[in-house]
Amino acid sequence: MALIKKFRIKGFKNKLPIAKLEKISLSFAKRQILDNISFNLNSGEIVGLLGPNGAGKSTIFNILMGLVKPDFGRIIIEGDDATSYPIYLRAKKFKIGYVPQYGGYFNDLSLLENLKSVGEIIVKDERERISKIHDLISKFALDNVQEVKAKFLSGGQRRKLVICMALLGDPKILLCDEIFAALDVLTIHMLKEILVNLQKEKPNMCIVVCEHQARELLSIVDRALILSNCKIIAEGSPNKLIKDENAKSQYFGEFF
């Protein structure tokens, strides 16, 4: 497993995490999805969520964003109980950015028009908005495709676009859902470099990545959680997780 991350954060100066999920439980149609889940998200770290299909990874994202309300438990963000906050208020008050697995852009708008459409809502000052958009286009090397409609962009360019759209609001928490899905090896490596560089450039932002590709995820995170059978079965650094017996038996397998 080739590591591109040269350091891992092992401790955090802030006593209070940026967000906490406390004893979260959720069921859909009498089917248990999450059972008494608790964990913290800290400023400056990259956190990974791993687990088989249906383990509740994307559901945790929906709960953090306010799309789904848990049956039991609380979501604490920056010290406030945000459990009952609607999605728009949560995004605005706590600056939560989201990079979905699919979509997240307007097909018939150009890359630049997509950024402008979101920027006009998030960034009220026109000069600041224009500056942010052009900075992101330059940073993500999208200059030569900024006038191309989103539906004609490559898979990697679309992912870059959606990350840019999420970054326009200067998020404190950036949620990335399956961003490596259906991409080639070079594009996945490019996206991993983007996430690691974001951690260096924005040291107070927490990046949370939900992913099936365990090797790719573990090469960039500081800490990961593995969900299985509605619970967190293992948590810790990549080195700790690959030696964890629960993680081996219920997720990785003996030959990982």
Image (cartoon, rainbow, N blue to C red):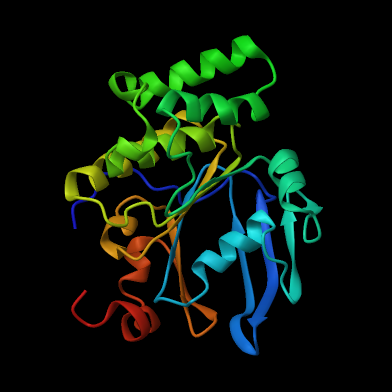
Residue 131: x and y in percent read: 52, 13
Left or right, 118 with reference to 16: left
The residue positioned 49% from the left and 85% from the top of the image is 229
Residue 11: x and y in percent read: 52, 50
Q: Quadrant of the C terminus?
A: bottom left
Left or right, 24 with reference to 233: right
The residue positioned 79% from the left and 54% from the top of the image is 85
> Where 33 sits versus 39, above or below?
below
> Where 159 sits versus 253, above or below?
above
The residue positioned 25% from the left and 51% from the top of the image is 183
> Where 182 sits versus 30, above or below?
above
Q: Is residue 199 visible?
A: no
> Where 76 sits versus 56, above or below?
above
Left or right, 46 with reference to 189: right
Based on the displayed image, in which of its 4 quarters is residue 226 positioned?
Answer: bottom left
Residue nearest the viewer, comparing 16 with 211: 211
The residue positioned 54% from the left and 24% from the top of the image is 116
Based on the displayed image, in which of its 4 quarters is residue 4 positioned?
Answer: top left
Left or right, 84 with reference to 107: right
Number of numbered discs present? Answer: 0
Q: Quadrant of the N terminus?
A: bottom left
Residue 79: x and y in percent read: 78, 50
Residue 105: x and y in percent read: 47, 40
Based on the displayed image, in which of its 4 quarters is residue 111 positioned?
Answer: top left
Q: Residue furthest bottom?
A: 30
Q: Residue furthest top?
A: 127
Q: Is residue 256 visible?
A: yes
